[in-house]
Image (tube, coloured by chain):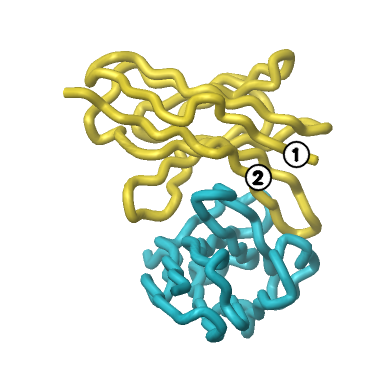
Chain colours: A yellow, B cyan
Amino acid sequence: AQSVTQPDIHITVSEGASLELRCNYSYGATPYLFWYVQSPGQGLQLLLKYFSGDTLVQGIKGFEAEFKRSQSSFNLRKPSVHWSDAAEYFCAVGTLIQGAQKLVFGQGTRLTINP
Amino acid sequence: GAGVSQSPSNKVTEKGKDVELRCDPISGHTALYWYRQSLGQGLEFLIYFQGNSAPDKSGLPSDRFSAERTGGSVSTLTIQRTQQEDSAVYLCASSLGREGEQYFGPGTRLTVT
């Protein structure tokens, strides 16, 4: 069965510092991978996705992620965080089921930004 | 344009009562999904619809949970005889087919007392 592990439950970084959020997945075939962000009281917003091709994908809000098949990882990065990036981040793997795509999420990483 | 909307935004109900949660997907989106977000279980897939049919209901936690979609649009998730462990945020998402981005609604926070 597919699974996603986000090893860090909570991360604190200073504003302006670089950020890397870790994600490891378990999936038999080539995965569809996603990062979503959830601000307090809000729904989930897609930051970026990987389906195939270039293993370094760019997303919104200055985020990027790199797919590494050998490590079964899809880590999210940002060179310089802003206070508005404080939120919960979810990595997900998508599995195609008939006419739809089921998302399996990791447990999430809560990001706190120090001023 | 309008995004995915869900109603109510908050629902408090007594144990044993039935509740209905509604999802209005983005117009034209053929696929609709329900997920549940709870402290203990994280984000779980519940069910999806392709058009009006739900080919896979295996994610529903128990037979007290059911869902329908009519006219290829609005969907209702019904929980019968609610239990305290049903307390969670229920999220709905829609997409343009299986490889389209899933757009999520703001969720319905259900509290069972």
Residue closer to the observer: A74 or A57: A74
Q: Residue at x 69, y 52 (%)?
A: A101
Numbered circle sitting on residue B85: none
As drawn, A81 above or below B52: above
As drawn, A75 above or below B24: above
Q: Are marks 1 and 2 on the same chain?
A: yes
Residue A60: image quadrant is top left
Say left or right for A97 vs A102.
right
Q: Amino acid at mark 2?
A: Val
- Give the residue at mark 2: A104
Count neighbours of disc 2 (C-alpha within 10 A) and say few if under 14, some if 14 to 19, many if 20 or more: many
Q: Residue at x 46, y 81 (%)?
A: B14
Q: Which percent across, then down, holds residue B82?
A: 57, 77
Query: Nearer the N terminus, badge 1 or badge 2?
Result: 1
Query: What element does badge 1 sit on?
Result: loop
Q: Amino acid at mark 1?
A: Gln
Question: Mark 2 and mark 1 in contact (Cβ < 8 Å)?
Answer: yes
Q: Which percent across, then down, holds residue B9?
A: 37, 71
- Give the residue at mark 1: A2
Pick the quarter of the image with the C terminus of chain A. Answer: top left
Distance of mark 1 from mark 2, alpha carbons?
7 Å
